[in-house]
Amino acid sequence: MSAVEISQVNKIFSTGKQQAVEALVGIDLSIEPGEFVSLIGPSGCGKSTLLRLVANLLEPTSGSVLVNGKPAKQARLDQDYGMAFQQSGLFEWRTVARNIELPLELKGWDKSKRQARAKEMLELVKLGDFATHMPWQLSGGMQQRVAIARALAAHPPLLLMDEPFGALDEMTREHMQAELLSICAKTGTTVVFVTHSIPEAVYLSNRVVVMSPRPGRITDIIDVGLGSHRDEDTREDTSFFKCITAVREALRGIEVTDIVRGIEDR
Amino acid sequence: MNRSPAAIAKAVAPPVVFGALFFGGWQLAVNVFDIKPYFLVRPTEILDKFTGNWDNVWKAMRVSGGNALVGLVCGAALGVAMSFVLLRFRVLDEIVTPLSIALNAVPIFVLVAVFNNMFSITSEVPRRLMVTLVVYFVVLVNVARGLRQVDATHVELMRSYAASDWELLRKVRVPNAVPFFFTALKIAAPGAVITAFVSEYFGGSQNGLGNKITSNMSTSKKAEGLAYVVGACLLGLAFYAISIIMESVATPRGAGERAGERA
């Protein structure tokens, strides 16, 4: 059974109106359990929309989205996935630990079980000493780690991430990527990861899904043959650069046609 | 906040020095230029009347302060209750919010003249009603905004947790509105005191600070009148201080600062 099964999905905003936007057209994508898949493309290509369809924060206009073999809505109600955004979205009136407990509270876990899990998750993201801190006392990178801990608190089989490291500086970003890979290796979580950084997508992923705008669609899927073990040396490996070039060329095709069309429109 | 005595002294010194210079200069000016008491009285005379007449000043403070307090509590309670109603019924919100903001811009305490005709003029009801109304709008506008202006990421997260509207209200909207409520209270508390005084200018019982100030001034008892002004200042400060203390007790450190930025 696939972790995520998207078939013939279309998403049109403002259906029937003059300014109707074809956000996604004819999307087919199947993601295996334990796989790390990145969605990449220029802005407006619908990558965030696609992630929200999987999360059932949006409903497709047509087609079907299955998560863990269930309709996306049921998967959301069962909290089968965790989610992290570019903004850490921590609740500033809750301590770090109580932020991580929130999804468990909503699942109806009792207090002692919640606290034990929060502690375990904080250890996992190496913030064991910060349980009683308030979010604003933490740096951006630390806040994002708390957000990941919270997303994984209920041990969901699937993690959905929308440019989670987009607001971090380059150094912190590379560090966080390595952390995320080691967490995923430990937990065996499937990840769908939206980014617009090519090296980030290549470093993290088993497969990179290249998307293009107007209408939003998948134009290419690139297999990243870097193996399962990746560390800082991977970033200097020739096969790493080869993959980056492959993704870049797939994206370049999009940009060129896009510009040409933009001129014709005028 | 654990500040050292030296740091506290450093923070307190400038206003204390300024106050001493101001009142010293005032006293000196009256003496040196031989300013007549019907124009300007000495600070020491005001202090004399304030301490010598303390029983009466305190009595008037209790009347005006009582009106302000009753109005503040009622207005805040009504404002909070109404902001929840507005959150629930969007159509109502579109009617009430612009009206509330418009009313905030007009000096509505003149309405006390109307209330004086509606209710017994010798009771405190018209004044308390006036304070209630002023506080109500300040609290309503702020709390309604706090309940509504929640982080879009927070809303998406709660949806991803399959949270109900009730859970969203309890775990996101209400905590988000708490700093807004205290911001409103900090504006409304001194406003309540001012409204209580001004309401007394429109007639009714001659028992509050506002009455005492005007009647003493009009009979040229400047020092007595100013002694009541000192009482009025103390009352305003007390209300403000209480609202700040309540805020620091109710909200964790830092949350208040952030609300200050947003408000």
Image: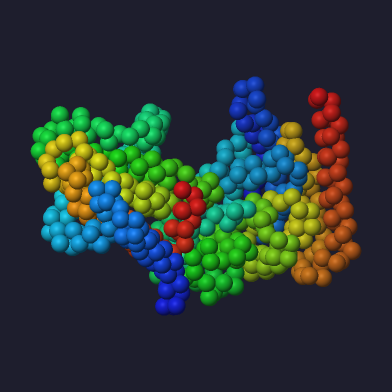
Can residue B80 be seen in this snapshot? no
Q: Residue furthest bottom?
A: B5
Closer to us: A209 or B212? B212
**Splitting the image into 4 quarters, where does residue B148 fall?**
top left
**Residue pictured at 19% horizontal, 46% vertical:** B220
- A129 up-or-down from B209: above or below: below
Closer to us: A186 or A95? A95
Question: Residue A211: image x %, image y %?
Answer: 76, 43
Closer to us: A235 or B112? B112
Question: Residue A202: image x %, image y %?
Answer: 78, 57
Name the side, left or right, on which B67 lies relative to B157: left
The image quadrant where one finds the N terminus of chain B is bottom left
**Splitting the image into 4 quarters, where does residue A261 fall?**
top right
**Residue pictured at 60% horizontal, 28% vertical:** A14
**Residue pictured at 46% horizontal, 65% vertical:** A95
Question: Residue A114: image x %, image y %?
Answer: 44, 66
- A93 up-or-down from A263: above or below: below
**Splitting the image into 4 quarters, where does residue B51 fall?**
bottom left
**Residue pictured at 30% horizontal, 55% vertical:** B34
Can residue A163 be seen in this snapshot? yes
Question: Residue A234: image x %, image y %?
Answer: 82, 67
Name the side, left or right, on which B137 lies relative to A237: left
Closer to us: A60 or B55? B55
